[in-house]
Image: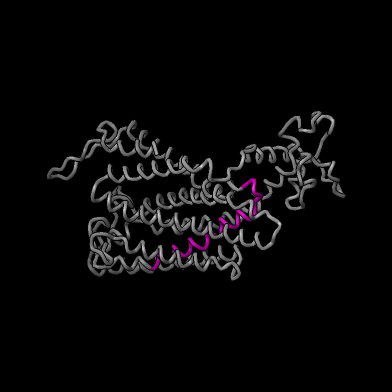
Amino acid sequence: MSVLWLTAILQQATEARPPPCKHNKGGEECVSPSSAQLALLFSAFVFMSVGAGGIRPCSLAFGADQFNQLVQVDDLKVKKRSVKILQTFFNWYYVSVGISVMLAVTVMVYIQNAKGWVVSFGIPVVLMLFSSTMFFLGSDPLYIKMKAKSSLLTGFAQGIVATWRNRHLSLPVPPLESDGWYHHKASKLTAPTDNLRFLNKACIFRNPLKDLDSDGFAMDPWSPCTITQVEELKALIKVLPIWSTGIPVAVTLNQHTFVQNPTSLLRRLWNPEYDSNRGLLCSSSSSLAIKVHQKETWASLKERMGIGIAISCLATAVSAIVERKRRNEAIREGLSNYPADAVVMNMSAMWLVPQHCLTGIAEAFNFIGQIEFYYSQFPKTMSSIAMSLLAFGMGVESLIAGLIVSIVKNVTQIEGAGLMGVVRITR
């Protein structure tokens, strides 16, 4: 919230931004921002990203913690109903995220164009203030808060280091009894599983008399590791292949946000001044997909993610067809050699609706499926890691998408100006 406020006042502080461009007969004379101004702006973006990284995965895990007590009961009917409630929570959490994104790219953009940057940044500051107030007022008496334990990331690193240190040791055949593996006395895991057996070397004692202290704890936490630490590391490694499949989907969906395509079209759907109808259509398609997604008996989590991947491929194909239509229309109207940001074609932006509706459906199937899959595969102590994997994948996707933009910019550049500069409308 503080960084949003800082970003808002940057628009008013004359020292924090370059002076306005001067218009003359020869064109515009603009002064580039200084290194200090860019550093101030980028630092605000970094802090906003760090804040979002702390809120998004933790808020989802925090909400899931409210239902853990019911999910772990022995009554099968209560447990099944609790799992259904948890799935509904995941679905509607993503619906709320989708609605917020829709409002951000429609209402906030409209306010930005009509009222300026200061007002458009000030509104999120007020919303974050309201959100923070509600969180602190209701966090103590109303919610279940799990006690923090040791860092999972440190445990992962310790498991990898212990495996490397014991790499020359041989796994016992037959497997050792519970006393041969390092585990805490209160732990339910007394022997590691056979999956990814090479990691089991991290649990082997080299010398029990030297490795453990008088209380039964490891003298060196980096060797050996507990069975729980090793099994948590295994759980993370096992989901990485599924996690990697979500990155191309996110990259594909991100490519539909390029502005050169819609800016050359007639930006009028049903309302000539406020283009929110496309967002409403896409939100409706996502809600419909989530409604189907809630039918847990018709497809497994992996099948739902696969459906999302297939629909994202279809959305890309539709996008390619629309782009070909746009290029042919530009050639027909004799606009081939004009910059893409200098002309508006006689082609409605409604052509963009199908691909965006398909992307909304793909997101509903794939992303919600990922959230449920990670949560089902990890132990409850790793719920925050499980919920952060999707956001981490989105971050990797943004970097890959940025690389694609850079490549396209270099390929399509004309006389030193690239995709964001003077680009022919047919490029």
Q: Is residue 339 above or below residue 212?
A: below
* Picture quadrant where residue 355 is located: bottom left
Q: Position of residue 62 (x, y in %)?
A: 55, 47
In the drawing, does residue 131 fall left or right of residue 65? left
Predominant SS of the magenta segment? helix
Q: Position of residue 155 (x, y in %)?
A: 66, 39
Q: Position of residue 52 (x, y in %)?
A: 46, 44
Residue under the point 28% across and 66% down: 269
Judged from this view, the residue extending furthest toward the right is 174
Q: Is residue 379 found inside the magenta-colored segment of the image?
A: yes
Residue under the point 36% across and 33% down: 40
Q: Is residue 382 above or below residue 412?
A: above
Which quadrant of the rendered structure holds the N terminus?
Answer: top left
Front-lying residue, 83 or 166: 83
Front-lying residue, 251 or 294: 294
Which quadrant of the rendered structure holds the C terminus?
Answer: bottom left
In the drawing, does residue 51 fall left or right of residue 5? right
Residue under the point 52% across and 61% down: 366
Judged from this view, the residue extending furthest toward the left is 25
Stretch of the chain drawn in magenta: 354-382
Front-lying residue, 273 or 14: 273
Q: Position of residue 149 (x, y in %)?
A: 64, 38
**Can you see residue 388?**
no
In the drawing, does residue 47 fall left or right of residue 260? right
Q: Is residue 184 above or below residue 261?
A: above
**Can you see residue 410?**
yes
Judged from this view, the residue extending furthest toward the front is 141
Q: Is residue 415 above or below residue 186?
A: below
